Amino acid sequence: MIRQYETRAGRRYPSGATVDELGVNFSVYGRHATGAELLLYAAAESTEPFQVIRLDPRINHTFFTWHVLVVDLPPGVHYTWRMDGPYDPHGQGLRFDARVELVDPWARAVTTEVWDRWRRWQEGPQPHDSPRAVVLADAYDWQGDRPLRIPSEETIIYELHVGGFTRDGSSGVRHPGTFAGIIEKIPYLQALGITHVELMPVMAFDVQDVPKAVWDAGLENYWGYSTHSFFSPHPGYCVSPEAGAHRREFRDMVKALHQAGIGVIMDVVFNHTAEGNGVGEVINFKGFGNETFYCLDQIDKGIYLDFTGCGNTVNANHPFVTRFILDCLEYWVREMHVDGFRFDLASAMARDANGMPMAHPPVIWGIELSEALASTKIIAEAWDAAGLYQVGSFPGYRWMEWNGRYRDSIRGFVRGDPGLIGEVATRIAGSSDLYEANLRLPINSVNFVTCHDGLTLADLVSYEAKHNEANHEGSRDGIKENTSWNCGVEGPSDDPLIWALRRRQVRNFLAILMVSQGIPMLLAGDEVMRTQGGNNNAWCQNNASGWFDWRLLETHRDLLRFTRELIALRKRHASLQRRYFLSGRHRSPFSDQPDIRWHGLELDAPNWDDKRACYLAFTLAGRAEDEGPLHVLLNMDDSPQTFALPSLPGWAWHRAVDTGLDAPEDISPPLEQPLVEGESYRAGPHTVVVLEAASAG
C-alpha cells in the first residue's frame, strides 16, 4: 500500500506543483470555489487515487487561491483537482461540479491515458477519467544553451508539424512523430538553410476535439489548435509521456536545434481552448473559473461569445488571464529556451470581455513590453474568425504579422492576374503602406505564399477548388477562394506541358518570396512538392495526407536543390535583408546607385498605370562592400517579354535564376553562373529571372 502523506497549509505562489526541500506545494486558482480536493495517483494509468486530500478553507485558501503542501511527496506523482461551488452557468457564469476531476492549468506535464471525451459526452462525468498532471523536478543540464538572438532581417522561417514531419515510415527515424524525431532531421533543416522552425501547436491539446462524424470516420484533431494545458508539451509528441518526460524531451529538441544554429518558434493558441461552448467538455478552466477565463454573454452567461469559430473565446484581457498568458510565455522562454511565438487568431486577444476591439489591449501590450520577452520573436495572425482584420495595424511596435496582403497579392500576380504590379511592388519592397506610418519596419512583415491553413504550394498550382471530402464535413470547411490556378487541368495530370508549367509556377513563388523584403516563411514540404490532394483544411488528417513523405526528396531533388540555392542567394545579399524601407532615393555607402530602381520592359519605366501589365523588374544596389547589385525580372504574362538591362560601370551581369529553364540551369551558385551579354534579357512566359552582378575586372 502506498503511504499516506502528511499535509501542511502550503503557499499561494507559484501556481501549479512545485518541488522543494519539504515536498511538493500545490496551488491553483478558484476564486468562487467553496471547496477543493487534490487527488494523487501513482501512475498515468492508475484507476484509483492513492490519496485524496480535502483542503480546509480556513487553512488552505487565500484570496483567489487554494494551496497545500504535501510533505515528502516525490516527483513523478500524477494528480488532478476537484472543485466544489455554485453551479449557475446562466446567471453568474459559474460551472463548479465536484464530480469532475480537473487538470491543473499550470501543469508542466499532462498525460491522457484515461481521458475519454466521447464516453463522458455520452454517459456524463466518469470517475477518474480526466487528463492528469505530473509532478516534475526541475533538474536539466542545458550545457550553456540560451535562446538564440538571430536578427529579424536574417530570419527565414520553416513552418512544420512536429508529428507529421516524421510520422511517415519513409522518415526512417527511431521515434516517428515526436520531438526526438525532429532531432534526427536537423541535418536536413541545416542543409535547407532556414534559420527558424515554427512548430504548429505543441502545447498539450485534445486530439478528441472534433465533430462526432469526424471522430467516427477515424479522424482526430491533428493540427492541435485545441489546447487545454498551456504549460505542458503535448504528450503525443513524447516518447515516454507516462513517465513525465515531456519537459526533458522538448528541451532536448530545443538544445539540439540551437546547437545547429536553428531557432524555435511556437505556434500558440490563446484565443480559445479545447473546452468548447456551453455543451463542450469541462477539462480545467470551466471548472476553476469559467466566468474569469471566457468571454460570456452579459445577459445569459451560459452563452459563450465565439470570435474564433471554435466555440469559445478566451477573456484574454481580464487581469488574471493576462497574467496567466504572460507567465506562460515567459515560462517557455525562461525554462524551455524557445525563441519566439506565433499567435493564432491574435486579433481575438485584442477584444474585451464583451467582444469589443480594444485600442490598447493589456495582453497585447503586456507581451510587447515584457522584459523577459524582449529578445523574443512575437508574430501575430492579425485577424480572427469574426471579421476583425488588423494586418498592418496590430497594437504595439515589436509585433510582427503574418502578411495576408502579401500572400493574396503574390498569388494573384503569379497566376497571371493583370493590373497588380503596383501592389506587387509594394509587397516585394516590404509593405511600407501597412507599416511605415506606424513607425514599423519591413521586418514586421512575415511574408508567405502558403501555410498550414490552405493549399500546399504544389496544390496551389494544381487545383482551383478545394477538395475536402476526406474531412467528412460535407466540404463545408475550408475557405472557398484560394487565389489558385490549376494550370489548365484540375488535379493530377500526365500532360508534360501542364506538369512543366506547374513546376515553373512553384519555382516562381519560391523565387519571389526569397527576393522580397521582410521575413520569408516556407511551409514544410513545399520544397519537394508535398500534396494534400487539394484539401485546403487538413486539420483532422493524421495520415499520409497530412504527413511529410520523405521519398519526395528524391522524386523532386531538383526542386529541393532550387530551394536550397535560393535561400543561399538570399543569405549572401544584404540588400535582401534590410531593416528599413526602400525609397529609391537612398544610396548605399558602397554604391552610387539608389537602393532600388523600378523598371518595366524599359529601364526606369514601370507600367504602374497599365491595368493589363503582368511584368515588372527592379534593381537592388548592394549594401555591403563586396556585394554586387541584383536585377530581378518578373514576367507573369502568357508571352515572353524582353527586358532592357541596366549598365553599371565596373559590374557584369550573371544569370543566377531563370525559372523558365530546366534543372540544373534554373539556378546556379556564383562560380557557375553564365555571363549575360547584351543590353537585354528575354524572359519566357511565367518566369522569374534573377541576375547577380560580379566585378567586371
Image (cartoon, rainbow, N blue to C red):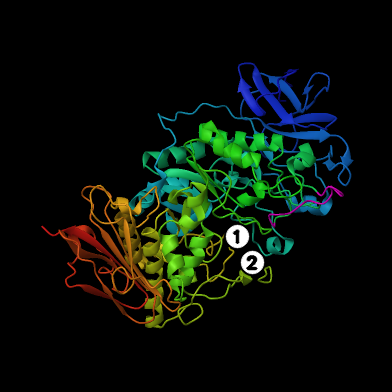
Report the amino acid beneath label 2: Asn
Residue denoted by label 2: 471
Residue 139 lies, in percent from the top left, at 51, 26
Tell which residue pokes out farthest to the left in this image: 697
Q: Is residue 509 shown above or below 86?
A: below
Q: Main secondary structure of the magenta part?
A: loop
Picture quarter with the N terminus: top right
x and y, in percent, of residue 37 in the image: 79, 30
The C terminus sits in image quarter: bottom left
First of labels 2, 1 by sequence position: 2
Residue 511: x percent and y percent? 36, 64
Give percent across and percent down for residue 168: 48, 58
User: Above or below — where is 414 with respect to 240?
Assistant: below
Secondary structure category for the residue under label 1: loop
Frontmost residue, 585 versus 492: 585
> Is 162 positioned to the left or the right of 614 in the image?
right
Q: In which quarter of the image is residue 246?
A: top right
Q: Look at label 1 and name its amino acid.
A: Trp
Residue drawn where x is 35% and y is 49% of the image: 190
For disc 1, the marked residue is: 539
The answer to whether residue 48 shows anywhere in this view is yes
* Residue density around tag 1, few if under 14, some if 14–19, many if 20 or more, within 10 Å: many
Q: Are marks 2 and 1 in contact (CB under 8 Å)?
A: yes
Name the side, left or right, on which 124 lies relative to 112. right
Q: Which of 388 and 656 is in front in this view?
A: 388
- Write down the region rendered in magenta: 297-309
Please tell me whether mark 2 sits on a helix, a strand or a loop: helix
